[in-house]
Amino acid sequence: MKFRSVFDIIGPVMIGPSSSHTAGAARIGRVARNLFNREPKWAHISFYGSFAQTYKGHGTDVAIVGGLLDFDTFDERIKESLEIARKKKMKITFREEEAVPEHPNTAKITVGDDDGELELVGISIGGGKIEIIELNGFKLRLSGHNPAILVVHDDRFGAIANVSNILAKHQINIGQMEVSRKEKGKMALMTIEVDHNLEDLVIDEIAALPNITQVARIVD
Amino acid sequence: MFRNVAELVELAESKQKKISTLMIEQEMEVTGKSRDQIIDQMGVNLDVMEQAVEKGLQGVRSVSGLTGGDAVLLQNYIKSGNALSGELLLDAVSKAVATNEVNAAMGTICATPTAGSAGVVPGTLFALQNKLKPNREQKIEFLFTAGAFGFVVANNASISGAAGGCQAEVGSASGMAAAAIVELAGGTPAQSAEAMAITLKNMLGLVCDPVAGLVEVPCVKRNAMGAANAMVAADMALAGITSRIPCDEVIDAMYKIGQTMPSALRETAQGGLAATPTGRELEAKIFGLPLNKK
């Protein structure tokens, strides 16, 4: 089941006008911000499908930048996010892509600063609900049916065991887990689908583990 | 856990529980939260809805200038005493319009199930206030019942205009509202399902063709008619009328229609009303040039 909570249906509380093109976009931007772990200096945002056709009317551009500024869907500052980003000297570029995406509401965000870059692809599947389908070129093969977190970590022994120990301590069952890396000993990823929504406390505990760079919810 | 409307109705009947109760219980199971936490969370959504209606009834205007002020016109018309289709019905319509006018003006709303269709459920709920006199708890239950039916649609079909057209958004919202009205009015779970089926049948095929890609034209007026549709369908179900096609099959039909709907009619602003001469003209006026000629 893609939608698990009644609050996916009655909710979110948000700034209009579109749950998929405004609230969903803000959420995709905010995941990028959380995974990058700091305010980026620049962002390239590519819109595909319906996002490319209608982003101006729906405030998708404003919302996604709002997300990059760490604003929630109901944060009134979303309306002024482009202005706020300009004041912070955050360089933003938008592109309307012609390529036909698998899902009609797709956005690719690349963010960066002097210390690094991060690229993700997110889709907005309706009612404000989103899924992250790609991170730094890694395809995230999620069923989308269960809550999922993404853990970026250094490719070291024990990292995976430590994460699963924390989940076990909180009695959270792992439904599906995938680990991948680009190169031995470098950056690696865990995508973990679990049976219950994760409280902030659990996420914080995982983030505090050694060798863990970032943790983010990618499906709630 | 219920997966479809048939299971939901059967659970409600066998356990002698309201649909709203089943939705709350399922939410407790899925999230591990307490009943009070879940009810409080829905209470916040209810408050946002009420504030949006109040704001819209005072009169708002969108940035583009395409929408705003119609909720006020309707309220004034109701007060004139000349309303032909019934004051309660028009009250629901005006409150649905109020919500969507606030949404179009980038105000704060609660998506039900989406922002573009956010007017229908609160519009009908607050219109029934005088007649059925629900207390706060019952208003919150109304939202859980609406949510239960929306939950089934979202998981078995779609609630996204880009994926399934307006039938998936305003169509779903209207069906959800109709089912919740029936429960609030004292109808049975089976009658809620009938009301949902009757409503959605009349929304099948509705395309998503927003002028200039804005959630304004025709979205605001589709919420108006969605609210009216929900009220009438609820009355029909409460009168004992049933749908020849079961609710789950109507939902499935909606899904399949959405899949075969051309992309021009799924929130791309390329077909339907968006592509009319006036639609294109408005688009050019708002953005300087038509989106399809950039």
Image (spheres, coloured by chain):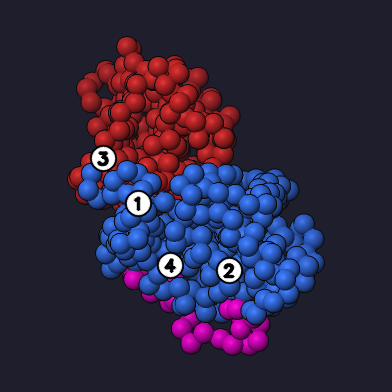
Chain colours: A red, B blue
Q: Is residue A19 above or below residue B277?
A: above
| Chain designation of label 4 | B
Tag 4's secondary structure? Answer: helix
Which residues make up the magenta segment? B232-257
| Residue carrying label 1 | B283
> Of discs 1 and 3, which sits in the foreground?
1
Q: CA distance from mark 3 to mark 2?
A: 36 Å
> Of discs 4 and 1, which sits in the foreground?
1
Percent across and percent down for residue B29 are 60, 52
Most common SS among magenta residues? helix
| Chain designation of label 1 | B
**Amino acid type of the residue tagged 4 in the rendering:** Gln
Q: Same chain for labels 3 and 2? Say yes or no.
A: no
Tag 3's secondary structure? Answer: strand
**Amino acid type of the residue tagged 3 in the rendering:** Glu
Q: Same chain for labels 4 and 1? Say yes or no.
A: yes
| Residue carrying label 4 | B167
| Residue carrying label 3 | A96
Could you tell me if the residues under marks 1 and 3 are in contact, i.e. CB atoms within 8 Å?
no
| Chain designation of label 2 | B
Residue B248 falls within the magenta-colored stretch: yes
Q: CA distance from mark 4 to mark 1?
A: 24 Å
Is A72 situated left or right of A111 in this image? right
User: Residue sitting at 56 percent across and 35 percent down?
Assistant: A75
> Of discs 1 and 2, which sits in the foreground?
1
Tag 1's secondary structure? Answer: helix
Could you tell me if the residues under marks 1 and 2 are in contact, i.e. CB atoms within 8 Å?
no
Percent across and percent down for residue B98 are 61, 57
Residue B122 falls within the magenta-colored stretch: no
